[in-house]
Image (spheres, rainbow, N blue to C red):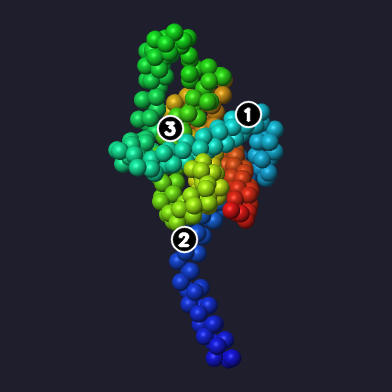
């Protein structure tokens, strides 16, 4: 017994020693920046270079009462949930379509994935040209079909949905690739058994494929949601937050407070609030996604 306990103790010590590099990594690159950000949020001005005064929690109180913060938060939540939902549905649909024996499927997969690796600067230039209300090819196509042209990025009602559409166009290829890998890992014997039982292709997809893809869906949803909640580039490069703050994403709002107005303390408070919100949403997603799956 004593020898067995000694062996377990040695194994535990070895395990902790192997974990030390990972612990240092998280302490330096994860926990330290979070602690530094919280510390900076307790000051007004620029605490990181010493030009500041201690403000306690007043930055948080001011942020809660700031109408533009609340509006930016609502815009960001609509954008994040909408873009994530559309990305998941589009990625899954494309993966299901291109997982079959379609001629040229490799080419189509590459074409659909390509936008994901393009810089947002290029995407912004391209889509601003396509969506230009006067010279854009999209409005040209609408006019050719007898439909009225739209001010896609300049109208309060269409700017945010258009921005979400561009984001889905960019990210759907990544989701498709993840779903393709998951679909190809499902044993074909499951489908053979379902066919013998008389299940139609739609029933197989509904009662077999979707439940088996639940862990993959959880992964795609969590990654997409975290990415979209922190998004900055689309608002900065495509719409500049307008019109009338309709596309003022929270990340862009914080960026302006920090680097345009040089109010690092207030921007740090906003960032820390967003960190807590992302943490809460991610926890809820894991809670909902970890339910027992019944076939």
Q: Which residue is mark 3?
A: 169
Q: Earlier in the sequence, mark 1 or mark 2?
A: 2
Would you say 59 lies left or right of 236 here?
right
Indicate the position of residue 47 as horizontal and vertical percent values: 55, 44
The Cα atoms of the two marked residues, 2 and 3, are separated by: 34 Å
* Circles 2 and 3 in contact, beta carbons < 8 Å: no
Q: Does the rendering let one see residue 43?
A: no
Q: Earlier in the sequence, mark 3 or mark 1?
A: 1
At 60% from the left and 48% from the top, the residue drawn is 285
Classify residue 103 by image quadrant. top left
Against 203, is 10 above or below? Answer: below
Front residue of 60/119: it is 119
Which mark is nearer the camera, 3 or 1? Answer: 3
Indicate the position of residue 137 as horizontal and vertical percent values: 37, 16
Indicate the position of residue 91 as horizontal and vertical percent values: 45, 39
Would you say 1 lies left or right of 186 here?
right
At 34% from the left and 39% from the top, the residue drawn is 102
For label 3, the SS is helix
At 44% from the left and 8% from the top, the residue drawn is 146
Mark 2 neighbour class, 10 Å CA radius: few under 14, some 14 to 19, many 20 or more: few
Against 27, is 206 above or below? Answer: above
Indicate the position of residue 247 as horizontal and vertical percent values: 54, 26
Against 22, is 90 above or below? Answer: above
For label 1, the SS is helix
Q: Which residue is mark 1?
A: 71
* Circles 1 and 2 in contact, beta carbons < 8 Å: no
The Cα atoms of the two marked residues, 3 and 1, are separated by: 25 Å
The Cα atoms of the two marked residues, 1 and 2, are separated by: 36 Å
Q: Which residue is mark 2?
A: 25
Which mark is nearer the camera, 2 or 3? Answer: 3
Q: Earlier in the sequence, mark 2 or mark 3?
A: 2
For label 2, the SS is helix
């Amino acid at each position: 017994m004593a020898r067995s306990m000694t062996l377990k103790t040695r194994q535990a010590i070895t395990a902790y020693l192997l974990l030390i590099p990972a612990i240092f990594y998280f302490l330096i690159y994860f926990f330290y920046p979070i602690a530094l950000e919280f510390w900076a949020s307790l000051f007004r001005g620029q605490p990181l270079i010493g030009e500041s005064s201690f403000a306690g929690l007043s930055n948080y109180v001011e942020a809660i009462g700031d109408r533009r913060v609340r509006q930016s938060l609502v815009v960001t939540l609509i954008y994040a949930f909408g873009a994530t939902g559309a990305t998941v549905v589009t990625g899954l649909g494309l993966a299901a379509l291109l997982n079959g024996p379609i001629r040229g499927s490799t080419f189509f997969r590459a074409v659909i994935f390509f936008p994901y690796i393009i810089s947002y600067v290029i995407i912004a230039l391209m889509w601003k040209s396509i969506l230009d209300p006067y010279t854009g090819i999209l409005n040209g196509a609408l006019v050719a079909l007898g439909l009225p042209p739209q001010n896609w990025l300049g109208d309060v009602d269409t700017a945010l949905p258009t921005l979400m559409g561009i984001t889905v166009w960019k990210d759907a290829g990544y989701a498709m690739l993840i779903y393709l890998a998951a679909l190809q890992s499902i044993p074909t014997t499951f489908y053979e058994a379902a066919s013998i039982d008389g299940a139609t292709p739609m029933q197989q997809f509904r009662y077999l494929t979707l439940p088996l893809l639940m862990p993959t869906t959880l992964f795609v949803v969590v990654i997409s949601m975290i990415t979209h909640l922190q998004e900055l580039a689309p608002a900065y490069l495509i719409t500049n937050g307008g019109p009338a703050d309709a596309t003022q994403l929270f990340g862009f709002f914080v960026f302006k407070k920090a680097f345009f107005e040089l109010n690092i303390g207030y921007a740090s408070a906003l960032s820390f609030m967003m960190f807590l919100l992302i943490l809460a949403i991610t926890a809820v997603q894991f809670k909902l996604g970890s339910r027992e799956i019944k076939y």
